[in-house]
Image: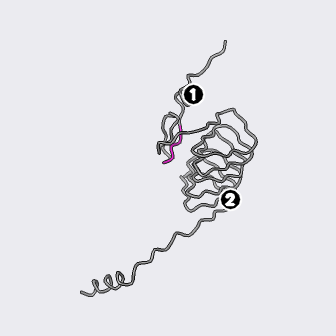
Amino acid sequence: MWKKDKIDNSGVPAGGNAIAQDGSQESLSGESSDGGDIIAFVGRGVEFKGIISYEGTIRIDGHLDGEVHTEGTLIVGEDATLSAKVSAGTVISKGTITGDIVAKEKVRLLSPAVLTGSVKTPTLSMEEGVLFNGNCEMARAEVREFPRETMARAANAGRQ
């Protein structure tokens, strides 16, 4: 009468696909591509309202209405919908996000992601097919200055 999918040790249905931190597809094994554990998983059909605050990597494939706060990574699956204010180290999304994102490291939007809201991050990448409606603010990269004697040597080398 009741039929369960096979569950691996991460609590995720076997044969599911994850978005690795580098954006590639991989089998869900409970680990992100950098070797860190995916500490939580909000599966398809799950609705969560409230504030999620965590360290590490979390994957959302369901619906979240609220806020996400972390220094770690937020992975948003293709079937996920977030109506949320997000503050994270890294955000990788193939799903739908309505709200503002602040990421200290980077934001990667992979097709068919939809983002409606503002983004503040030093690094933003988007694949063809992504829909982004909003504003983006990116911090300037630091300008590296060379010592004066290095500059003088380079100038003199061109004259010889």
Q: Indicate the quadrant containing the N terminus: top left, top right, bottom left or bottom right.
A: top right
Mark 1 nearby-residue class (10 Å; few <14, some 14–19, many ≥20): some
The residue to which callout 2 is attached is 118
Comparing 147 with 91, the one in front is 147
In this rendering, would 118 be left or right of 12?
right
- Whether residue 21 is in magenta: the answer is yes
**Mark number displayed over residue 70:** none
| Residue 128 included in the magenta stretch of the image | no
Side of 30 relative to 99 (left or right): left
- Badge 2 local density, few (<14 within 10 Å), some, or many (20+)? some
The vertical placement of 98 against 137, above or below, is: above
Q: Is residue 136 left or right of residue 153?
A: right
Q: In which quadrant of the rendered view does residue 57 lie?
A: top right
Instruction: Identify residue type, mark 1.
Output: Pro
| Frontmost residue, 111 versus 117 | 117
Residue 83 in percent (x, y) is at: 73, 47
Q: Residue at x 73, y 36 (%)?
A: 47
Q: Which residue is mark 1?
A: 13
Q: Nearer the viewer, residue 88 or 13?
A: 88
Residue type for callout 2: Ser
- Label 2, secondary structure: give it: loop
| Residue 102 in which image quadrant | bottom right
| Furthest-top residue in this view | 1
The number of discs equals 2
Residue stretch rendered in magenta on the structure: 18-22
